[in-house]
Amino acid sequence: MNKALMPQVSLAALMAARPQAALGAVHAEANPGNIEQLMREVRQELDRIGGDVKRTAEDALRQSRDSGELTRELKNSADQLLTQQKILTDAQQKLTDRLEQLETRNTDLEQQLSQRGRGNRDQVQSFGERAARHDDMRAFAQAGCKGTVRIALDVEQAITSVRPGGGGLIWSDRETEIVGLPRRQMTIRNLLSQGRTGSNAIEYARQTTRTNNARPVTEGAQKPESDYIWAQESALVRTIAHFVHVSRQAMEDAQQLQTEIDTELRYGLMLAEEGQLLKGDGVGQNLEGLVTAATAFVPAFAVAGETMIDTLRLALLQASLAEYPADGIVLHPTNWAQIELTKDGEFRYIFANVMQLAGPQLWGHPVVQTQSMDLDEFLTGAFKAAATIYDRMDPEVIASSEDRDNFIKNMITVRAEERLALAIKRPAALITGEFNSTVVSSGAPVSSA
């Protein structure tokens, strides 16, 4: 055997005979990389010795064929090689086992660190728990709880969450979800027709006069003349906007805050838009809202014992008589609840079916509930025919430090804005009014006749 290989074989033999001594440094560092390096060296030696064993076996085969027996030197060489091969194989197995142990240990450590002390909280016991588990208490219970038992608890050595000894080891759970204020569901925009514009105003022609003199005429007679008049109308684009100041540190340190501010600013725009679409007075920079432009409710006839349901049916009739069949009703949520709770003379609900999840409808028309509508006020009509929203700029949120003294104060101004116009082309298609104070507006029984 090559003498140059003997030091490495001796190292392998040392590892096989005294693995703890040979792997002491690796055990202390708990570094699987060092063990993997030793395993590579052992594999290389096994490959070399395997080659020597193969060559020795071939020599032994030739000698046996030529002379019929093996020389003592060849026998000793083969025995040494086989012994060294076994030593290295055992060392390789020990290194493999050690590597698996270290990997398991590292996995356990990672899991413990990920818990960040959560397991320790379960070990903290209150005085009641310690008393219940005390040997004297158990003996007292086994004796039938007769007499009196005294249990001494060492207050100085007790680990509690309020003392400095244990308080630092107890962590509170942290919820990542931000608990915000409630947000209103927006409903009015979806009732209207929608379009886009690239200008600051919408101009359209609205017919104001229709004098129709069409009639049958005799042969040779002069035909009658009709008269039609259109007037030019316009709806100006308005801007809805607001802003908030935030420190740069807060925006950088709390990334979730950026999303929350963005969401709040957009919600603020939608809330203001809903109010403008419904009740804007058209003065200054305000939109002219649907209620402002709508036609006042004038019932076609009186109904004895009129209820809120009757009033709304008369409003639907008014829209139909104006040649604008209604496609929806807008009410305050309280008024709709009053209608749903209306009962007949036998205390049966007239419209509501408490066992079904049907959408709100009245007289075959969808009912939209919004708190942007005043209590005891209603709006109905052909919404899509009556008005169109023209979006000039969709809601956008922009942050900038170039505002007043933001730069020197490390502040950021976050602004949200949108631009839109509302063209109410057919005011007669909208009917608005209030429920009369004499109208039955509660869930009290009404006549079913």
Image (tube, rainbow, N blue to C red):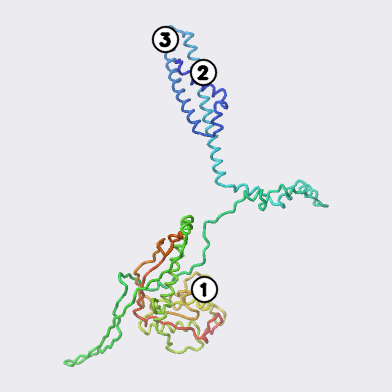
Q: Nearer the viewer, residue 249 or 240?
A: 249
The residue indicated by pointer 2 is 83
Circle 2: residue type: Thr
Give how far across and how far down residue 263 sits, in percent. Answer: 45, 63
Q: Element at badge 2? A: helix
**Residue 73 picture location, percent across and down:** 48, 9
Image spot of residue 347 (x, y percent): 57, 79
Q: In the image, which disc is placed on residue 65?
A: 3
Q: Which residue is mark 1?
A: 353
Q: Residue at x 31, y 80 (%)?
A: 233
Q: Could you tell me which secondary element the residue under label 1 belongs to?
A: loop
Q: Residue drawn 30% across and 71% down?
A: 199
Task: Answer with mark 3 or mark 1, whichever residue precedes in sequence.
Answer: 3
Query: In this orientation, which residue lies closer to the viewer: 28 or 292?
Result: 28
Residue type, mark 3 in image = Arg
Residue shown at 54% from the left, 40% from the top: 107
Q: Position of residue 169 (x, y in %)?
A: 62, 48
**In this image, 395 relative to 438: left or right?**
left
* Crowdedness near tag 2: few (<14), some (14–19) or many (≥20) residues, C-alpha within 10 Å: few
Alpha carbon distance from label 2 to label 3: 25 Å
Q: Quadrant of the N terminus?
A: top left
Most extreme residue toward the top is 67
Residue 321 appears left or right of 36: left
